[in-house]
């Protein structure tokens, strides 16, 4: 793919941006000039929780909304994004719903690669991390080192070094008593929780085999490249399609179903995996459009995962688990959670009138309850392990080799460029099994 060079883009604050656009109409009563003091001064000494969002796209805006709905004392005081237009759309969206609790003046709208650090330094209590995945290790570490509670969207890293960093940050958060809630949202979903409790309580007996699917038809949209965009800007605006930013769709999206394998196995880790994968119809970026992974466990159990992002093919998010005493079926995208059931010696199904609260909302209820009531919630270790399982599957598919857990965890393959800047940046080559090296 040819990526045209473009001029370097300076890092700017929103204040500078607003000054540069003198005369621009400001619709919100909380925008520049209408808010007489800084948001942090406003909340000093109160029981308010000042929340900052890093990554103001679709999920980040949703997470901020969830945080506001979870706790009446939450106010949003700072936003950070690589691009000012994403802050604009996020602010509009949040102000439309929660006008009196979005106290983000122009000095608290941070733009650029260092925006996360300026947001952390702005006096927030809680940080919501929802950027493309490659940034998660660096951002999480900065948050916990600064003593912030964190909601951390999945997935957690794109490479082995990133996962090791997440494990270290989780330990720092634990030592400091900080709350750390992950965005592996099915862990916060009532029917899935009930089913996993039954499995852990032994209704299936020992697990022998699992099969999880994450097949989607639609692709994530991406904008047409504009003439003044650097490679970096283009890639970030289409980040799902660049493995160095997203980890590929097995890490970015299908990780949910790989996490279900890890959850069912109650934290037991696979020893190795083999995988196939390819890029059959996708022409954008450098990612694959399908993966098939077989994980092996020390007990002899096997787990098989299939994921696909190919247009005009059916959606499927079903999971099958076979145990010594029976089988389990789960369809998390199904209309009726009562379809979740266990057959065999000890039959069970989720009740027709069982709860099915919004799992995205529940994540934030758990987060703010733990902060308010000192419950010390920390998802750090398992969220890192589920991420590594996904990365391990990708490594096996890209290389065509058997990949052990230890090889994935100790991998020296680094996807981050070292320094983030608005410069030219050739994408990594598309992997070719049998030729791409295991690093
Ligand atoms: N749990 C779920 O079901 C679920 C659903 C969707 C997305 N997600 C996850 O949420 C995260 C965000 O996904 P999305 O769909 O909102 O993507 P998105 O592209 O809509 O939003 C990402 C935002 O991050 C910004 N950004 C990029 N680099 C940045 C940087 N260095 N610093 C600050 N901001 C930066 C982008 O400009 C963009 O506004 C991803 O990790 C994704 O996997 C989770």
Image (cartoon, rainbow, N blue to C red):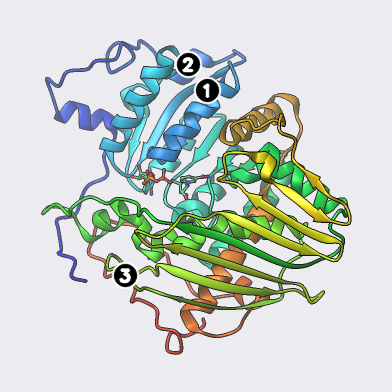
Q: Nearer the viewer, mark 2 or mark 1?
A: 1
Q: Residues within 10 Å of mark 3 (few under 14, many from 20)?
A: few
Mark 3 touches mark 1? (CB < 8 Å): no
Q: CA distance from mark 3 to mark 2?
A: 54 Å
Residue 360 higher or lower than 390, as above or below: above
In percent of the image, x 35 and y 63: which residue is there?
242
Q: CA distance from mark 3 to mark 1?
A: 41 Å
Q: Which mark is residue 41?
A: 2
Q: Earlier in the sequence, mark 3 or mark 2?
A: 2
| Circle 3 residue | 281
- Residue 212 place in picture, x, y as percent: 61, 61
Mark 2 touches mark 1? (CB < 8 Å): no
Residue 60 higher or lower than 245, as above or below: above
What residue occupies the far bottom of the structure in this picture? 434
Q: In the rendered view, does 204 fall on the left or right side of 418?
A: right
The part of the image, by quadrant, that contains residue 308 is bottom left
Q: Earlier in the sequence, mark 2 or mark 1?
A: 2
The answer as to whether callout 2 falls within 8 Å of ligand 1 is: no
Q: In the rendered view, does 10 fall on the left or right side of 73?
A: left
| Circle 1 residue | 68
Q: CA distance from mark 2 to mark 1?
A: 20 Å
Q: Nearer the viewer, residue 176 or 3?
A: 3
Q: In the rendered view, does 350 fall on the left or right side of 227?
A: right
In percent of the image, x 86 and y 53: which residue is there?
203
Q: Residues within 10 Å of mark 1 (few under 14, many from 20)?
A: many
Q: In the rendered view, does 103 fall on the left or right side of 301?
A: left
């Amino acid at each position: 793919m040819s990526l045209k060079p473009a001029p370097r883009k300076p890092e700017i604050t929103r204040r500078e941006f607003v000054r540069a656009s003198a005369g621009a109409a400001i619709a919100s009563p909380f925008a520049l000039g209408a808010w007489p003091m800084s948001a942090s001064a406003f909340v000093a000494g109160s029981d308010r929780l000042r929340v900052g969002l890093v990554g103001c796209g679709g999920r980040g805006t949703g997470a901020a909304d969830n945080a506001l709905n979870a706790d009446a004392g939450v106010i949003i005081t700072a936003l950070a994004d690589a691009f000012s237009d994403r802050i604009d759309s996020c602010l509009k969206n949040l102000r439309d719903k929660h006008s009196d609790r979005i106290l983000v003046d122009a000095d608290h709208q941070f733009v650029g690669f260092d925006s996360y650090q300026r947001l952390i330094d702005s006096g927030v209590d809680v940080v919501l991390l929802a950027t493309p995945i490659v940034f998660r290790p660096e951002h999480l570490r900065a948050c916990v080192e600064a003593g912030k509670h964190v909601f951390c969207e999945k997935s957690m890293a794109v490479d082995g070094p990133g996962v090791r960093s997440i494990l270290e940050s989780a330990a720092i958060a634990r030592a400091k008593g900080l709350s750390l809630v992950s965005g592996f949202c099915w862990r916060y979903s009532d029917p899935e929780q009930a089913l996993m409790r039954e499995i852990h309580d032994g209704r299936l007996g020992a697990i022998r085999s699992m099969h999880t699917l994450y097949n989607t038809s639609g692709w994530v949209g991406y904008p047409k490249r504009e003439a003044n965009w650097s490679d970096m800007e283009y890639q970030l605006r289409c980040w799902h399609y660049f493995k160095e930013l997203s980890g590929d769709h097995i890490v970015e999206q299908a990780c949910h179903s790989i996490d279900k394998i890890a959850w069912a196995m109650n934290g037991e880790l696979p020893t190795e995996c083999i995988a196939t994968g390819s890029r059959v119809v996708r022409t954008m970026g450098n990612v694959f459009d399908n993966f098939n992974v077989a994980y092996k466990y020390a007990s002899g159990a096997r787990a098989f995962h299939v994921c696909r992002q190919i247009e005009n093919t059916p959606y499927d998010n079903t999971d099958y688990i076979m145990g010594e005493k029976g089988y389990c079926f789960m369809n998390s995208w199904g209309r009726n959670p009562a379809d979740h059931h266990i057959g065999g010696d000890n039959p069970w199904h989720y009740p027709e009138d069982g709860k099915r609260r919004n799992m995205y909302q529940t994540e934030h209820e758990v987060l703010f309850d733990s902060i308010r009531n000192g419950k010390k919630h920390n998802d750090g270790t398992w969220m890192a392990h589920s991420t590594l399982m996904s990365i391990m599957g990708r490594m096996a598919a890209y290389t065509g080799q058997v990949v052990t857990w230890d090889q994935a965890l100790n991998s020296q393959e680094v996807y981050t460029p070292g320094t983030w800047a608005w410069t030219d940046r050739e994408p990594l080559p598309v992997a070719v099994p049998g030729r791409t090296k295991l690093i």
